[in-house]
Image (cartoon, rainbow, N blue to C red):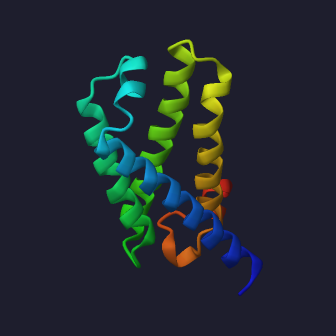
Amino acid sequence: MDMKRFGFWASTGLFALAMGAGGAADLSGSLDEAMVQLGMPLYLATILGTWKLLGVVALLAPGFARIKEWAYAGFFFNLSGAAASHILAGHGLGAAVPPLVLLAVGAASYALRDESRAVFPVGELAAA
């Protein structure tokens, strides 16, 4: 296995594990107190948890390149929104670091994906 493929599966596995655990935590209600502290309605955790789990399935399932693109986009919006929410709620930059680190892992997964898994190969995006 070459290094790019190893890097893809390592980052994708870690990312999928973290997002899957986050989705399960959202659905279990264990993050309800955090949602209240951020000023979010509790039903949002159910929506986000469901989307996270569906996104993980999309990333790991073979084929469905366009759905994978949407999953990566959804994770970007979720994680960047989480970081912004912590900052805007007054929790400080330290609380924004975990979602930003996870976002970097997801970005590595996206950048290292095989061309067969991409609707828009990274090389095409750089040339545009």
Q: Quadrant of the N terminus?
A: bottom right
Residue 128 visible in the shown view:
no
What residue is shown at x 49% (from left), y 23% (from top)? 85
Total labels: the figure holds 0
What residue is shown at x 31% (from left), y 36% (from top)? 45
Residue lying furthest right: 3
Between residues 95 and 103, which one lies in front from this camera angle?
95
What residue is shown at x 42% (from left), y 26% (from top)? 34
Q: Position of residue 70 (x, y in %)?
A: 39, 54
User: In this rendering, would 31 be left or right of 28?
Assistant: right
- Please identify the quarter of the rendering in which residue 110 is found: bottom right
User: In this rendering, would 82 be left or right of 30?
Assistant: right
What residue is shown at x 62% (from left), y 38% (from top)? 98
Residue lying furthest left: 43
Q: Position of residue 84 (x, y in %)?
A: 53, 24
User: In this rendering, would 83 be left or right of 45?
Assistant: right
Residue lying furthest bottom: 1
Between residues 72 and 26, which one lies in front from this camera angle?
26
Quick check: 79 above or below 122?
A: above
Residue 11 visible in the shown view:
yes
Q: Position of residue 69 (x, y in %)?
A: 44, 58
Between residues 7 and 33, which one lies in front from this camera angle?
33
Q: Position of residue 122 (x, y in %)?
A: 62, 61
